[in-house]
Amino acid sequence: MLKRTADWLEKMSVAAMAVGIFQGQSIGIFLGMACFAASLYLTRKAGGQ
């Protein structure tokens, strides 16, 4: 379940950063980075490291 959540967060991070960049909204970029950081955390937690 954690891996699926991490995968979803990774996809959302890419989408949020793309929207933020193309629409010129810095909040999208920050949300994308936050989603990516959460995805990395969950991936490490699910991997047992």
Image: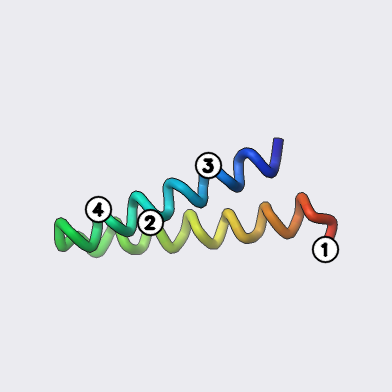
Name which residue lies at 43% across and 63% down.
33
Q: Which residue is mark 3?
A: 8
The first of marks 4 and 2 along the sequence is 4
The first of marks 2 and 3 along the sequence is 3
Secondary structure under the numbered disc 1 in the rendered image: loop
User: Residue 6: image x %, image y %?
Assistant: 60, 47
Crowdedness near tag 3: few (<14), some (14–19) or many (≥20) residues, C-alpha within 10 Å:
some
Secondary structure under the numbered disc 3 in the rendered image: helix
Q: How is the image coloured?
A: rainbow
Residue type at mark 2: give it.
Leu
User: Residue 32: image x %, image y %?
Assistant: 39, 57
The span from disc 2 to disc 1 (Cα, nearest Å) is 25 Å
The span from disc 1 to disc 3 (Cα, nearest Å) is 20 Å
Q: Are marks 2 and 1 in contact (CB under 8 Å)?
A: no
User: Residue 19: image x %, image y %?
Assistant: 24, 53
- Quadrant of image for the N terminus: top right
- Quadrant of image for the C terminus: bottom right
Q: Are marks 1 and 3 in contact (CB under 8 Å)?
A: no
The span from disc 4 to disc 3 (Cα, nearest Å) is 17 Å
Front: mark 4 or 2: 4
The span from disc 1 to disc 4 (Cα, nearest Å) is 32 Å
